[in-house]
Amino acid sequence: MTVSNVEKISVALTAEMAIMLKETVSFGAYASSSELIREWRERREYRAKASERLGQLWDVGVMSGEAVDGPDAMAQIQDKLAKTTVSKTAA
């Protein structure tokens, strides 16, 4: 006796959604509706992880201090580099 981990359910879709699902499978992009749903779930999980990572990076950016515009930031970097180069040359 085999036990299946598949549960059959009924889902109500709008006519437009049902057509889109059937067309996507019939065009050969997916072997079945289940495969399409699996990919949808994987994409949702990926987006959730990416969103979480983006939030972490945002927090790091906010904690790094006040924002500086590109030209001003480049001027600060060049000034710091020039001072470092002068101090190494003088040594």
Image (cartoon, rainbow, N blue to C red):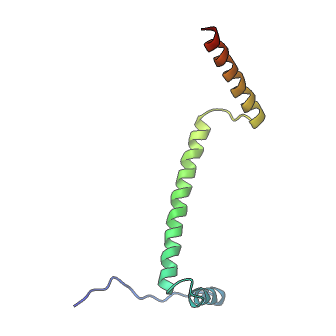
Residue 48 higher or lower than 63, as above or below: below
State the image coordinates of residue 83 (x, y, percent, origin top left).
Answer: 67, 17
Residue at 27% x, 86% y: name it: 3
x, y (%) of residue 67? 69, 35
> Residue 13, image x and y in percent?
58, 87
Residue at 25% x, 88% y is 2
* Residue 72 figure quarter: top right
Residue at 50% from the left image edge and 86% from the top image edge: 31
Name which quarter of the figure residue 51 lies in. bottom right
Instruction: Indicate the position of residue 50 as horizontal and vertical percent values.
Output: 54, 57
Q: Which residue is the extreme one toward the front?
A: 89
Question: 76 and 15: which one is in front?
Answer: 76
Which residue lies most toward the left here?
Answer: 1
79 sits left or right of 52 in the view = right
Q: Is residue 74 above or below residue 52?
A: above
Q: Quadrant of the C terminus?
A: top right
Please tell me how many numbered marks the rendered image carries.
Answer: 0
- Pick the residue in front: 30 or 68: 30
